[in-house]
Amino acid sequence: MSDKSLDELRDALRRFADARGWDAYHTPKNLVMALSAEVGELTDLFQWLTPEQAAEAMRDPELAWNVHDELADVVHYLVRLADKLDVDLVDAAFAKIDRNERRFPTGDLRPVE
Amino acid sequence: MSDKSLDELRDALRRFADARGWDAYHTPKNLVMALSAEVGELTDLFQWLTPEQAAEAMRDPELAWNVHDELADVVHYLVRLADKLDVDLVDAAFAKIDRNERRFPTGDLRPVE
Amino acid sequence: MSDKSLDELRDALRRFADARGWDAYHTPKNLVMALSAEVGELTDLFQWLTPEQAAEAMRDPELAWNVHDELADVVHYLVRLADKLDVDLVDAAFAKIDRNERRFPTGDLRPVE
Amino acid sequence: MSDKSLDELRDALRRFADARGWDAYHTPKNLVMALSAEVGELTDLFQWLTPEQAAEAMRDPELAWNVHDELADVVHYLVRLADKLDVDLVDAAFAKIDRNERRFPTGDLRPVE
């Protein structure tokens, strides 16, 4: 468990963008695209792996490093986007669990979300 | 700021998947695809908006609701994926800020990350 | 093999967009996002399938219909995007095969493209 | 207009994959991921551009080259995927235009597809 919070991360990313004059580029539309492009890079790491190889991905030091690196980029743009849209990601995620509890009562075995 | 942590979210999502027998579907390869598909749904909300309209998206109650809903799905699969890969998302994101500080010294005005 | 060409498709999609006043929305930036969102819907169809199930996807009539439907959407936006950017998709693809022939001489067994 | 057909492209891509032993990696599930990753690279080219800059993208020789290159990769994996799924992309796209003609009668001004 990190000793830093998501709010501290949001603030650090704000400062990073501001210090470089990048805030003007960080519009919601652009950030959605950047998030999508980074998920593409994450996808690239897993696309040719069998499910078994993918499950063991973190045992390969180079691949593990790349996974950390791409996940970090995904988090950066997701947190920046949520900041610009004034959405609390954790609250939104818990609220969706509540909706999903009603939508998929226990016992439903299909992953249909 | 949420009064819940990302770790509590991770645990809640574990319980949700376990209670429905979905854990077997939540392999890293499948979760990367699910994350990608959810980012696609988020993209769908913004694709026809001008940058100006996108910046005002949250003033439209229906669109704001959909943005919360899709961001929540993105967070769900991102947190599930990180859980399966044993990656701390906040630590990974802070470590990447450190690398980016060196890669893009202050003064660089291009958003090239 | 279709008795229609990709150029006929491009023209039909132009007429479709023009007749509905949608051409103004079909900017390159928006079309890239629309293409990405449609690939997300295609991804959604395959995300929970094992590789073996995915290989048999077209034997399930409902899934096969959805695959046709989503692939069609992907083609629509890809062809619209190429039209707006004045790119011949087939020529670009053949030119890339030539570059890949040099980049990956026969005998290289890793799928690294 | 290219003097080559999409069927010739499909055959050339088959030969390319076979000659490198890559056919085994080209399962539908993997190809959907590869398509998604390549659309991510295309998205990366447009993410920070304003709509106006994106509309002029092809006037920048380096950017134009990259757009051709990424579109080619998208086409490669889309054609490989359709080949593996035995889908005629042009026929599927025309069939979808027919369905969209009924779904969006002329006069509907919203891009809702």
Image (tube, coloured by chain):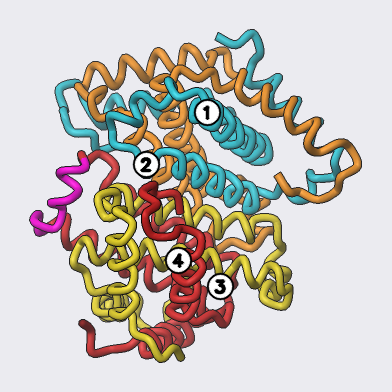
Chain colours: A yellow, B red, C orange, D cyan
In the figure, is residue C110 to the left or right of D48?
right
User: Residue flagged by tag 2: what amino acid is it?
Assistant: Met
Badge 2 density bin: few <14, some 14–19, many ≥20, Cα 10 Å: many
Residue picked out by circle 1: D62
Give the label, 1 or 2, closer to the camera.
Answer: 1
Percent x, y for residue C96? 67, 28
Magenta-colored stretch includes residue B30: no
Disc 1 to disc 4: CB gap under 8 Å: no
The N terminus of chain C lies in which quarter of the figure? Answer: top right
Letter of the chain that mark 4 sits on in the rendering: B
Q: CA distance from mark 4 to mark 2?
A: 29 Å
Marks 1 and 2, how far apart at CA: 21 Å
Which mark's residue is nearer the viewer, 1 or 4?
Answer: 4
The residue pinned by badge 2 equals: C33
Apparent side of residue B8 relative to residue D60 in the rendered image (left or right): left
Q: Which mark is residue B101?
A: 4
The chain carrying label 2 is: C
- Which mark identifies residue B25? 3
Secondary structure under the numbered disc 1 in the rendered image: helix
Q: Position of residue D81 (x, y in %)?
A: 63, 40
- Residue beneath the point at 49% across and 82% down: B88
